[in-house]
């Protein structure tokens, strides 16, 4: 099973490819943006650890 962090890393790696069409690149960038937003939401929902 792929974690959200792994998925983000795979998308970033895909963007380094020189063989992407503009359409593919836009699609990957959009998916990456959504994954990063999801990651931000997940981290914001975590309770802060007690001091």
Image (cartoon, grey):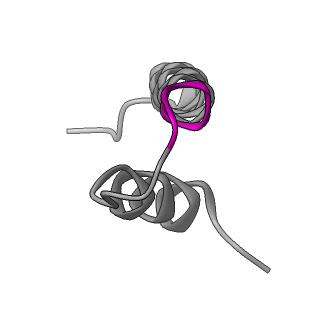
Residue lying at the far right of the rendered structure: 1
Q: Is 29 rendered above or below residue 49?
A: above
Which quarter of the figure has residue 48?
A: top left
In the image, residue 36 lies at what x, y percent?
46, 29
Residue lying at the far bottom of the rendered structure: 1
Which quarter of the figure has residue 17?
A: bottom left
Q: Is 43 rendered above or below residue 9?
A: above
In the image, residue 37 lies at what x, y percent?
51, 19
Residue range (magenta): 21-25
Q: In this view, does 16 lie to the left or right of 38?
A: left
Question: Image point 57% across, 59% down: which residue?
Answer: 7
Residue 3: say if magenta.
Answer: no
**Dominant secondary structure of the residues highlighted in magenta in the image:** helix
Question: Image point 60% across, 26% down: which residue?
Answer: 23
In the image, residue 29 lies at what x, y percent?
47, 28
Q: Is 19 rendered above or below residue 2?
A: above
Q: In which quarter of the image is the C terminus?
A: top left
Q: Identify which residue, 15 or 23, lies in the foreground.
A: 23
In the image, residue 40 lies at what x, y percent?
45, 24
Question: Image point 80% across, 80% down: which residue?
Answer: 1
């Amino acid at each position: 099973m792929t974690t959200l962090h792994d998925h983000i890393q795979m998308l970033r790696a895909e963007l380094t490819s020189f063989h992407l069409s503009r359409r593919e690149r836009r699609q990957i960038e959009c998916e990456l943006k959504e994954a990063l937003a999801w990651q931000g939401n997940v981290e914001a929902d975590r309770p802060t650890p007690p001091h």
